[in-house]
């Protein structure tokens, strides 16, 4: 039987591409910035952001700012969808095996596990040098002011970011890939990048984003809603923890409707506190995280990634068996 034979089901293409994408990520990491689609999304958002937002000192125009922000978002999302759909069609003309591998290579650019793991590990390494080094390194991961953070605050910020971005950078792109193929993953990645750059209340870098970024923030909330809960469930399941009621009660403590779920799951499975001063505190009865907890958190996320790979392999094998 030829690999290009149309009898091979779509499930093998999707599952095989997921396995290839995660394998490429683990082996090679990120592609060069010049060809990285998320970098190009960021450049677009940076340029358009200056058009849709206002200088913080100027008088607000909520309706105009919201409309411009929404239009700017839709233009970027539509372009991401069209490019991804075109690539999908082009790859579909190739032999079956090449189709799966190259689709996985493109999908990899829309997710990132290895870089996330390495950046969080680098924060812990920096803390062994000094608190200032740890603050500086964690500032690469968070947008909050890090100048007053102590060792525990830095570690909590790093672990929280790890849990939250396990969803944003791995589970959610793969979820939307499973739902809508490469275009689904591309639109989600654009939406998540837009939220990171535009989704602020108030001033950021001299621009006011209260209304200009509102659509981007809400769109990301909608697209991340189910994946965030799946991520939390996967974290809990990998250690056989079934305290769903405690997960839900902690997750609702964060301002975001989604980020609290994977963060709460991480706090519960390690029995540690994760918080942001004056904003929220997850699992308050837990202990403060120590250096070993950072590595443990990375290992728990690694188990989730390994579980996704195992699921992809099983789907491929089952689909082949049923032919």
Image (tube, rainbow, N blue to C red):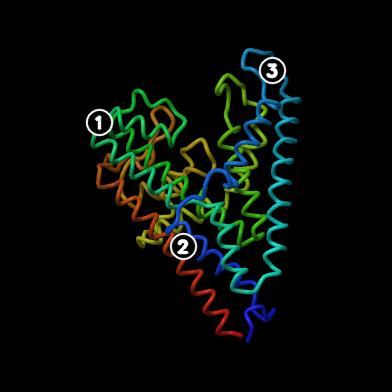
User: Within the image, what quadrant is residue 147 found in?
Assistant: top left
In the rendered structure, are the residues bearing label 1 and label 3 in contact, judged by CB atoms less than 8 Å apart?
A: no
Mark 3 surroundings: few (<14), some (14-19) or many (≥20) residues within 10 A: some
User: Within the image, what quadrant is residue 237 found in?
Assistant: bottom left
* Residue drawn at 62 percent across, 17 percent down: 56
Residue 131, position as x, y percentages in the image: 27, 29
- Spatial CA distance of label 1 from label 2 is 34 Å
Residue placed under numbered mark 1 in the picture: 130
- Spatial CA distance of label 3 from label 2 is 48 Å
Identify the element where label 3 is drawn: loop
Residue placed under numbered mark 2 in the picture: 23
Identify the element where label 2 is drawn: helix
* Residue drawn at 67 percent across, 70 percent down: 94
Q: Earlier in the sequence, mark 1 or mark 2?
A: 2
Question: In the picture provided, is 155 more to the left or to the right than 32?
Answer: left
Point out which mark residue 13 bears: none
Closer to us: 311 or 285: 311
Question: In the picture provided, is 68 more to the left or to the right than 49?
Answer: right
Point out which mark residue 60 bears: 3
């Amino acid at each position: 039987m030829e690999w290009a034979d149309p009898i091979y089901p779509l499930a093998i293409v999707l599952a095989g591409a997921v396995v290839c994408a995660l394998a490429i990520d683990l082996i090679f990491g990120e592609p060069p910035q010049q060809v990285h689609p998320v970098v190009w999304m960021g450049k677009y958002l940076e340029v358009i952001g200056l058009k849709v937002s206002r200088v913080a000192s100027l008088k607000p125009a909520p309706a105009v700012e919201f409309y411009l922000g929404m239009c700017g978002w839709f233009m970027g999302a539509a372009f991401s969808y069209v490019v991804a759909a075109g690539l999908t069609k082009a790859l579909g003309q190739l032999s079956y095996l090449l189709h799966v591998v190259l689709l996985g290579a493109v999908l990899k650019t829309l997710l990132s596990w290895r870089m996330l793991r390495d950046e969080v590990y680098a924060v812990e390494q920096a803390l062994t040098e000094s608190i200032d080094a740890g603050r500086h390194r964690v500032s690469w991961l968070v947008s909050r002011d890090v100048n007053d953070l102590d060792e525990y605050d830095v570690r909590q910020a790093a672990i929280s970011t790890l849990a939250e971005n396990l969803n944003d950078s791995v589970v959610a792109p793969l979820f939307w890939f499973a739902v809508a193929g490469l275009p689904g993953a591309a639109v989600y990645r654009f939406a998540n990048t837009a939220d990171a750059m535009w989704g602020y209340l108030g001033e950021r870098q001299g621009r006011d984003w209260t209304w200009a970024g509102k659509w981007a923030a809400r769109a990301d909330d909608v697209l991340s809603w189910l994946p965030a809960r799946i991520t939390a469930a996967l974290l809990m399941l990998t250690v056989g923890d079934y305290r769903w009621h405690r997960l839900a009660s902690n997750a609702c403590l964060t301002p975001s409707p989604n980020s609290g779920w994977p963060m709460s799951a991480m706090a519960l499975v390690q029995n540690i506190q994760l918080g942001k001063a004056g904003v929220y505190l997850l699992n308050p009865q837990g202990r403060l995280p120590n250096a070993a907890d950072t590595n443990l958190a990375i290992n728990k996320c690694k188990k989730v990634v390994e579980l996704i790979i195992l699921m992809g392999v099983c789907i491929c094998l089952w689909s082949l068996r049923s032919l």
